[in-house]
Amino acid sequence: MKQTSVADDVLRAALGLFAAQGYANTSVQQVVEAAGVTKGAMYHYFQSKDDLLFAIYDRMLTLQTDHLETIVARGEPVDATLRAACVDVIETSIDFLLEGTVFFRSVHMLSQPRQQEVTRRRRAYHDTFTALVEKGQAEGLYRTDIPRGVLVAHFFADVHYLPTWFSTDGPETKEQVAAQLTELFLTGVAAAPGRG
């Protein structure tokens, strides 16, 4: 086994067990047995079960944050930038559907410092996303009769609801769903006569 794959093996095992039997009902011993490693090997990368749950989400959030920064850095018009950001967060959320489901089902069990770290990093992502909406409002593209926070919360509510209904075996691909939800959101926030 390559040393660099140990962390991946442990995380994969933890994800499977957390999904199947719940975070609270999974022991570190079960994780290392499923991963085929020793506790010492696991503790080289993760100090606790808490670290495992955090790391499962960290991979997803880090990827989404990197993607958003890349999209913004292109310097395209705000409407194109926001559209690309919406599509990306939906597609990556579908790619990490199991990770997101496991994490949000168990996030309340994380230690307080870990919860604070998650909140800080999610807020940073949302702030960047919200700044795009704000810029579009300043350019007259998006409605201003509804608070920005409500507009953004509406979009991310759809994203967070994905695990309850989306299936990779369903009739629509992640690309189709991402395009459809993005279109619904952007049509809903578009400025129109008489509504700001």
Image (tube, rainbow, N blue to C red):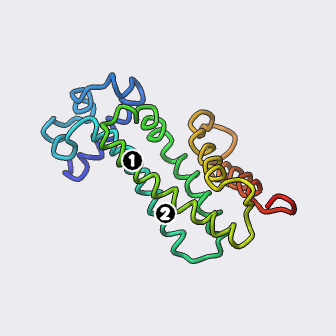
Label 1 sits on what residue type? Val
Q: Secondary structure at mark 1?
A: helix
Relative to 103, does residue 143 appear above or below in the rendering?
below
Label 2 sits on what residue type? His
Residue 92 in the image, given as x and y percentages of width and height: 52, 52
Residue 185 in the image, given as x and y percentages of width and height: 71, 53
Residue drawn at x 41%, y 54% as measured from the top left = 121
Residue 148 in the image, given as x and y percentages of width and height: 64, 56
Q: Which mark is residue 3?
A: none
Residue drawn at x 30%, y 37% as measured from the top left = 111
Residue drawn at x 31%, y 39% as measured from the top left = 112
Please state which of residues 147 and 184 is positioned toward the viewer in this rendering: 147
Relative to 24, does residue 13 appear above or below in the rendering?
below
Which quarter of the picture shows residue 44? top left
Q: CA distance from mark 2 to mark 1?
A: 18 Å
Please state which of residues 64 and 20 is positioned toward the viewer in this rendering: 64
Q: Total of numbered circles in the picture?
A: 2
Q: Which mark is residue 67?
A: 2
Residue furthest to the left in view is 40
Q: Nearer the viewer, mark 2 or mark 1?
A: 1
Count residues near mark 1 (Cα–Cα under 10 Å), then give few for <14, some for 14-19, many for 20+.
some
Q: Label 1: which residue?
A: 118
